[in-house]
Image (spheres, coloured by chain):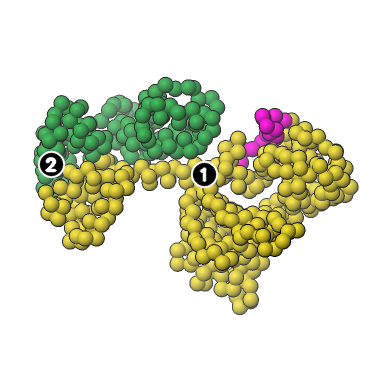
Amino acid sequence: MESKLNLGLHWEEIRAGNVKSLFDVYELLFDHLLNFGIRYSADVDLSRDLVNEMFMEIWDKKERLPAVENVKSYLLSYIKRKVIRHYYHDKLRRKAIDGQDIDIKELSYEDFIVHVQTEQDMRMRLKNALEKLTPAQSEIIQLKFFDNLNYVQIAELKSLTVKTAYNTIYDALKILRKEMNY
Amino acid sequence: MEHSQYTAVDFLADETFQNYFYGTVAEDVIFWENYIKQYPEKVSEINIARQMLTTLSANKKPVSAELANFKQQFYKRASTVADVPEMYVDKGGRLKVLKYAFLALIILAGSIFFLSKTQIFNQKEIAGTQTAGIFKTERAQRKKVVLEDGTSILLNADSKITLRKGFNIKTRELDLSGEAYFEVAHNAAVPFIVHTGKMNIKVLGTVFNVKAYPNERKTEAALISGKIEASFNNQNSQKFVLKPSEKITVLDNILLKTNQNQSSVKPDEVFVGNLSLNSKNAVVETVWINNGFEINNESFAELQQKLEREYGVELVFKDKEVMNYKFTATLKDEPVTEVLKAMKTVNYFNYKIKKNIIEISK
């Protein structure tokens, strides 16, 4: 259970040295933390490494961890600092090498899911397919398949009926399948 | 719509299918596994759905797989934490103790050498012999052995490994008496099996520790990474598959009841549990590989064999009461005199050292 209270209890257990709670929090929040990293880096492996590194750090300094009221937002800002620090160093390095400057900004869903594909052919097919979706379809596909929300949550968030949320996704999937030549 | 009419798009839009794919809801997993058996012709549509799910999620893996991977990293790191410099002793509450002598090697009675020799085993030399090779350590000695298949073994004090005939041909089987830390070279075609008096451990590319001293009640296998399967040499035909960070213990009840009626002896007991971490975040089961010495709420009587083995000494108790004193401590590279001094601060006792005999009194 990902409730604030439950996470808070786990946090106190981690501070007391209970390794099982470290693993429980990892399991509960991994997806959120990883997604956050992917949004900024479009790099799944890097994001995973940073999340794992963060949990190791938390364990190493458990005696010095602060009491935290909202564990989820605490860890989200923690991972954000790590992503930024990573790109800050990267940025400085690139600047030193070729004078190139890069910005740290949140990428769009279309950008990062295309970017994480390893095969060139797949990248092209996915890019073309996504261009056929309306912005509303594309956003709901992201909420469903990247953020892993269920239909009820999507309906609430976008002020739709559950039926409409379902139909929007269904139609979008039909387009994606056709355009990706499966 | 009927499930039998499903296309890839229907699978994708069905939340129970996602629960199955990510392994989050048990009943959905069971349902879809049965479905796949029932409708084998759906395999190609299901595969398209799987590929699209992966793509749209930005190639993420299920959390369970990520957690397993993280645990493996976590314990692997903890098993090689070399930094255990302080010496401290627990007594109910924690009583941190003492200066720490940072001695790399301690020479006691001229017989200790930790890791001083790496033996490279050459299979050709022993081909055709009854046993393929024997590696032994004496008390107060450790040895690192690298086998020809690339497996490395760190042998603790007073331990012996005997490679069985035909080692590294069809199988890699060996007998262990004592304690050893294994880093097994992966080769699924040639299974690696460790036999001890009580337990057999079958391995696929793995890092683990086995403790099986014939004079101790406990036989223990602790898994750091990979996968091992434990089976037993007695009537018990059960098998246990261990995941990383788990350990299995066999408790011999016969050794416990030496003076009692034989008919009251219970059979061996088997427990599966998690590895323990000490307050330095090192895995207790493997501190010895970094020359650490862990005392975990053990009585002097229980510690006797361990101390004798590690330091090549003999303990003589002048006072039986002292044998019941309990201690907890994490030590590293300490001579036996420093160990005794630290223990003395917890529960006071006196000791006299005569050559390698240590007399302990109140």
Tell me the element at label 1.
helix
- Decide: is B361 above or below A160: below
Q: Which of the chains is yellow?
A: B
Residue B350 covered by magenta stretch: no
Q: Please, which chain is the residue tagged with disc 1 on?
A: B
Q: Quadrant of the N terminus of chain A?
A: top left
As measured in the structure, the alpha-carbon distance from the residue carrying label 1 to the one carrying label 2 is 43 Å
Task: Write down the quadrant of residue A32 in the picture.
Answer: top left
Same subunit: marks 1 and 2: no
Q: Please, which chain is the residue tagged with disc 2 on?
A: A
User: Which amino acid type corresponds to the residue marked 1 in the rendered image?
Assistant: Tyr
Per the rendered image, the range of residues in magenta is: B80-97
Q: Residue at x 67, y 60 (%)?
A: B264
Evaluate if marks 1 and 2 touch, with contact meaning CB atoms under 8 Å apart.
Answer: no
Residue B86 covered by magenta stretch: yes
User: Which amino acid type corresponds to the residue marked 2 in the rendered image?
Assistant: Tyr
Mark linked to residue B75: 1
Q: Residue at x 10, y 41 (%)?
A: A171
- Residue B154 x, y percent position in the rendering: 63, 55
Considering the whole magenta stretch, tell me its main secondary structure. loop
Depth check: give the residue in front, B114 or B261. Answer: B261
Depth check: give the residue in front, A63 or B250. Answer: B250
Q: Residue at x 50, y 62 (%)?
A: B238
- Residue named by callout 2: A170
Side (left or right) of B178 relative to A32: right
- Residue B247 x, y percent position in the rendering: 54, 50
Task: Write down the quadrant of residue A34 in the picture.
Answer: top left
- Residue B216 x, y percent position in the rendering: 69, 55
Tell me the shade of chain A: green
The mark tally for this picture is 2
> Mark 1: few, some, or many residues within 10 Å (few <14, many ≥20)?
many
Q: Residue furthest bottom?
A: B128
